[in-house]
Amino acid sequence: MFRNLIAFPLLALVVIVQSAVISQMTLLAGYADLMLVVLAAWALKADAPSAWVWAIVGGIMVSFVSGLPWPVAMTGYLFVVLLAQLFKQRVWQAPLLAMFSVIFLGTLSMDILTLLVLNLLGTPLPLGDSLGLIVLPRVLLNLLFSIPVYAVVRDMAQWASPVKEVE
Amino acid sequence: MRNVFGRSLQTTIIFLIVGGILVLAFGGYLGTASSGLGGSLVGVQTWFATRFAAVQDFLAAPRDIVALRQRNTELEQEVSRLQGQLIELQQKVDETEILAALVDFTRANPERSYKGAAVVGRDPSPFLHYVIINRGSNDGILRGMPVVTNQGLIGRVDAVIADASRVQLITDPAAAINVRLQNADTDAVLVGSVTGDLSLEMISQEITVEAGDVVLTSGLGGGYPPDLIVGQVLNVRKRDFELFQQASIHPSVDFARLEIVLIITNFRPVDIEPLTPLNTP
């Protein structure tokens, strides 16, 4: 349980890397969401309670840095964890396939939620431009990042929650 | 007596032979023979010299290879160190150039107070155009302060914590800034977009706008101080059936390469919202 405290420094590091590095690596106008990828991988490998806690901590940290309204990040990441829990039960034999599915659906849902909320708050975001220049490149970049991130987070999840051998 | 005569004859014959050879040589009759002989001798000497050098190298090589390898390693380390130093110095030169330009800008505009800050990050969401700077309330930064570079306006402070601030860029889709066209002497509204492109809206149809016109802040609304450079008109879209013209703007600042910015600390934005009537008839 105490090993889950690693969430705080790790997710803080993820926010820093996202803000300082990943946001400079653009494809058209979009860039990857490292926090979403890390949370999805963690939710697929770790136990459910810690995944929810990680999503909340990650949502708070991203909201602290971003100009997005805080419910958007929080809801989006919690939804990603929910998706991961659903996929973990159904496609547990192919974890990488589950990872890709969660990343694809999670990115789409999070970005569409962002688009909706920002438009409701008066920020004019044309749907066509946003989908073509931000959302789709972001989906692609998240999928690319998901492979190395999944490998790292899998090892970390095993360290945090080692499987007990039945005697 | 006979012996003496024999020796004299022998000496005479030798002198004659030598003299004859010399005469033939000076006369150019021995050129082929001498060059052939010389070539052979040089060839033999070369053969000996190269073999001797090879043997010498073979005997001295192990000691030299060790020394050379050591020297090579030292030189490679030196090259690496100098390359690192070169990169570091190049970064310092770039930074100094930026700072010098900013100092020139502050000297040219002494009526304003500035605080320098480094851009340390960008918004995690690509839908928003914000940057994070390393100055906050501890440095006297307040929400709403304009942020500029020597090239022009970049935005204003949107949120502040102790040691950092978030700046909303003028390219943000939610940004709307009152500006004026310097040549046409008319007001308009500058808006950002999701792609980071800038455009001018609300330009009266009666105004003639041309590519290259300079766009400055007007100061209307109290959100920004007047006369900060924003950019230049790139092209104009004028349709007779529309109420207003539109224009694309080329920003004066390269937003992809923001490193150091200046915050105008003696400007307080005016909140005119309480003066706006709630129910306009």
Image (tube, coloured by chain):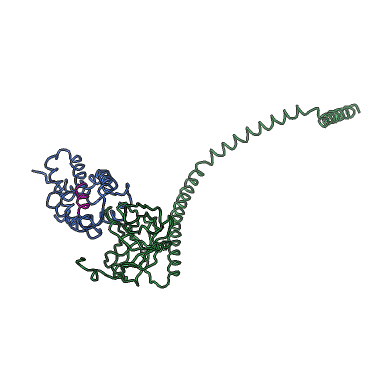
Chain colours: A blue, B green
Residue farthest to the left, as pictured: A167
In the rendered image, residue B255, in percent from the top left (x then y), is placed at: 37, 56
User: Which quadrant does the N terminus of chain A fall into?
Assistant: bottom left
B85 versus A92 height, above or below = below
Residue at left 23%, top 60%? A64
In the rendered image, residue B233, in percent from the top left (x then y), is placed at: 40, 56
In the rendered image, residue A48, in percent from the top left (x then y), is placed at: 12, 49
Residue closer to the observer: B247 or A83: B247
Horizontal side of residue B11 vs B183, given as left or right: right
User: Which quadrant does the C terminus of chain A fall into?
Assistant: top left
Is residue B141 found inside the magenta-colored segment of the image? Answer: no
Q: How many marks?
A: 0
Is residue A109 found inside the magenta-colored segment of the image? Answer: yes
The magenta span reads A108-116
Horizontal side of residue A51 vs B81, given as left or right: left
B163 versus A39 height, above or below = below
Residue closer to the observer: B77 or A56: A56
Residue at left 45%, top 67%? B104
Residue closer to the observer: A101 or A43: A101
Residue closer to the observer: B189 or B202: B202
Horizontal side of residue B51 vs B179, given as left or right: right
Residue at left 50%, top 46%? B68
Q: Quadrant of residue B113?
A: bottom left
> Predominant secondary structure in magenta?
helix
In the rendered image, residue B149, in percent from the top left (x then y), is placed at: 39, 63
